[in-house]
Amino acid sequence: MNVVQDISTVFIVLNILLALAVIFLERRDARSTWAWLMVLYFLPGVGFVLYLILGQRLRKRKLNKMLVESQRIIEDSIEVQKLQLEERQIAFNDPATINYQSMIHMNLVGSFALYTQNNAAQIFTTGKSKFDALLRDIESAQHHIHLVYYIVRNDNLGNRLIQALVEKAKQGVQVRFLYDHIGSKGLPRKFFKELRDAGGQAAAFFPSRIPYVNLKINFRNHRKLVIVDGRIGYIGGFNIGDEYLGRDKYFGEWRDTHLRLEGRSVLQMQAQFLMDWNLASSGMVELDYHYFPRHFQTVGTIGMQVVASGPDSAYQQIKDAYIRMIYSAKKSIYLQTPYFVPDESLMTALKIAAMSGIEVKVMLPSKPDHFFVYWATHSYLSELLEAGGKCYIYERGFLHAKTLVIDGQVASVGTANIDNRSFKLNFEMNAFIYDSATAGELERIFEHDLEDCYELTIHKYLKRPLMNKFKESIARLLSPIL
């Protein structure tokens, strides 16, 4: 009996000490602090373990060093472009972009995202079209292929991609493959053996020192990027796995959005990849001209900024850009996201827009892939619906797209979900597109997707079962730490 009491006392003391650390040392935001205090209070012992897994902060020394290095490389260009924006010296290819100069300035200052206007973009909404194009570009690579994916599967698509990379590595093309250790859990070590034997390289992002166990659930690299020869870039929501080709029986057809880019926007993706690689790999890669072509053929006229965000920054750059876009809306806001767990600032922006008569449409999947996040998502819908926003539930397979389109003039496509994990805890990257033609195409895709949705009205939402309300309430309380 004394042993049980002693163990109980230890748990109580650990809970108290951990609660004090959360309140006074960590200095988290209030919502996150209260969520952790509830977990520690109601789940003593278990809460301590959860905190070790989910509550750790990131050590930023090496990250800050990489950030300083990247800033040094482009700081002259940043200062020149800031001056040009402030003095209205930039001639925009799309006249509508004049309305978004303040947003361009914010992204430039907050995340060192240079604005470029010589870009071309191809939009993919199916895995087959995206991976067919990617494999063609890999086959034509001459100097290097850089890849970073959150999820990599040891299945048909994964092995097909590896074989294509092995062939290029044998030809002398530099191949570097960065994968997230948590997202790609279960991936066997031998998966990259043939690639390494051929001269390619592969590295895990934030792996565990303990075999088969990784407690670092936070601070994951959620980016999905490919850069070929510094001239072609891929960014969006598709990972590497057969389910992204619609071959999973549960999810069915996989609806996502991905971009193939050409132009100077690819250089921003390249710089971010090399920083990620140098952070994760023991083999440092210098940021030299081999990876940053100086001369580009005129491939397009699309204005674009590629914005990176993550726990290495004091700002939440992608969320801030979303909010700036929403407040700029005059007619419509179209949002597609698999998870809708906004913080107060983002929810307020959407509600103000809806109450102002702006058409606010949010599209969500009908199937959950993460139980708590799914129910937390539904807990936020009443606020939006009551403010006059509209919600559509996508039923043709699983909706994984992360797109935001404002007034058919400016848009965002990338890797960031609408949740705390994407905005604060994970490393993400989005392309912000200042081009009415491309934004209009994304708007038409959204409207086409509406044909496979049903509208969730406030009346239908209020009639949901009592058990659903209970699940939503619990998930919402935990949403700041999900």
Image (tube, helix red, strand yellow):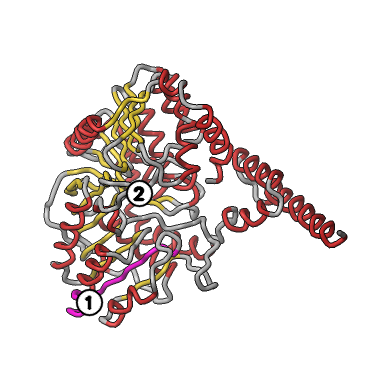
The image's mark for residue 136 is none
Work out whether residue 209 can be spotted: yes
Q: Is residue 174 above or below residue 70?
A: below
Instruction: Tell me residue 322's x, y (percent).
Output: 38, 37
Identify which residue is drawn at 50% across, 65% down.
62
Q: Identify the residue position indicated by label 1 in the image.
A: 169
* The quarter of the displayed image where residue 301 is located: top left
Write the start and end of the magenta stretch as one range: 167-181
**Furthest residue in direction bottom, as rendered:** 197
Residue 64 on the magenta segment? no
Work out whether residue 261 can be spotted: no
Q: Is residue 97 above or below residue 160?
A: above
* Sequence-wise first label, 2 or 1: 1
What secondary structure is marked by label 2? Answer: loop
Identify which residue is drawn at 48% across, 37% down.
375
Q: Identify the residue position indicated by label 2 in the image.
A: 415
**For mark 1, does the 10 Å Cα neighbourhood hold few (<14), some (14 to 19), or many (20 or more) residues?**
many
Dot 2 and dot 1 residues touching (CB under 8 Å): no
Instruction: Tell me residue 352's x, y (percent).
Output: 43, 22
Residue 175 on the magenta segment? yes
> Number of numbered discs present?
2
**For mark 2, does the 10 Å Cα neighbourhood hold few (<14), some (14 to 19), or many (20 or more) residues?**
many
Q: Is residue 339 left or right of residue 224?
A: right
Identify which residue is drawn at 20% across, 80% down.
170
Q: Is residue 391 left or right of residue 422?
A: left
| Identity, as a three-letter code, of the amino acid under mark 2 | Thr
What secondary structure is marked by label 1? Answer: helix
* The quarter of the displayed image where residue 202 is located: bottom left
| Identity, as a three-letter code, of the amino acid under mark 1 | Ala
